[in-house]
Amino acid sequence: MDLVSSQICKTGDIGIYNNLFGGKMLAWLDEAGGTYSASICCTPYMITLKMDEVVFKKPVKVNDHIRIYGEVSRMGNSSLTINLEARRFNFSSHK
């Protein structure tokens, strides 16, 4: 998988349980997917048709570093299917 994007979870990104808002993660994934698709197809005119499955495995806390990786799953004449994966890294605990 290719490194597509990275983000740092900031205090404005968290909810009442001190975890990253799921919607914020979805926005990061959507933006990363759009830019990755645009670079693969050499055009800025890409849209997200759908997200098949999103599984939130572990909470993201303030100052966690999120790295988003992507790979092309299928390429058609007028469509592109990609897989994205977000991985969490905490600088203080090195996990």
Image (cartoon, rainbow, N blue to C red):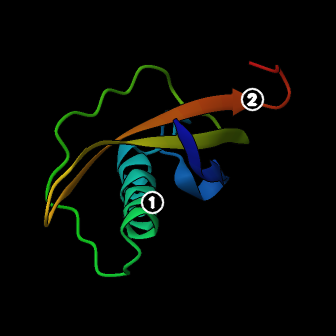
Q: How far across and down, in percent of the image, does residue 75 sit?
A: 23, 51
Residue contact at pointers 2 and 1, CB within 8 angstroms:
no
Lateral position of residue 77 relative to residue 56, left or right: left
Given the current orientation, which residue lies at the most extreme front position?
A: 77
All told, the count of numbered labels is: 2
Given the current orientation, which residue lies at the most extreme bottom position?
A: 44
Lateral position of residue 11 relative to residue 37, left or right: right
- Quadrant location of residue 79? bottom left
Question: Which residue is at a point 56% across and 36% down the rendered structure image?
Answer: 18
Question: Which residue is at a point 42% across and 62% down the rendered structure image?
Answer: 40
Question: Relative to 61, is 51 above or below?
Answer: below
Question: Relative to 25, is 32 above or below?
Answer: below
Under mark 1, the amino acid is: Tyr
Question: Which residue is at a point 23% across and 70% down the rendered structure image?
Answer: 47
Given the current orientation, which residue lies at the most extreme right position?
A: 92
Quick one: SS at disc 1?
A: helix
Please tell me how crowded label 2 is: few (under 14), some (14-19), or many (20+) other residues with Cα within 10 Å: some
Under mark 2, the amino acid is: Asn
Q: How far across and down, in percent of the image, does residue 7 sit?
A: 63, 52
Between 94 and 46, the one lying in front of the other is 46
Lateral position of residue 10 relative to residue 87, left or right: right
Lateral position of residue 58 relative to residue 54, left or right: right
Q: Earlier in the sequence, mark 2 or mark 1?
A: 1
Report the residue marked by disc 2: 90
Quick one: SS at disc 2?
A: strand
Report the residue marked by disc 1: 36
Question: Relative to 14, is 41 above or below?
Answer: below
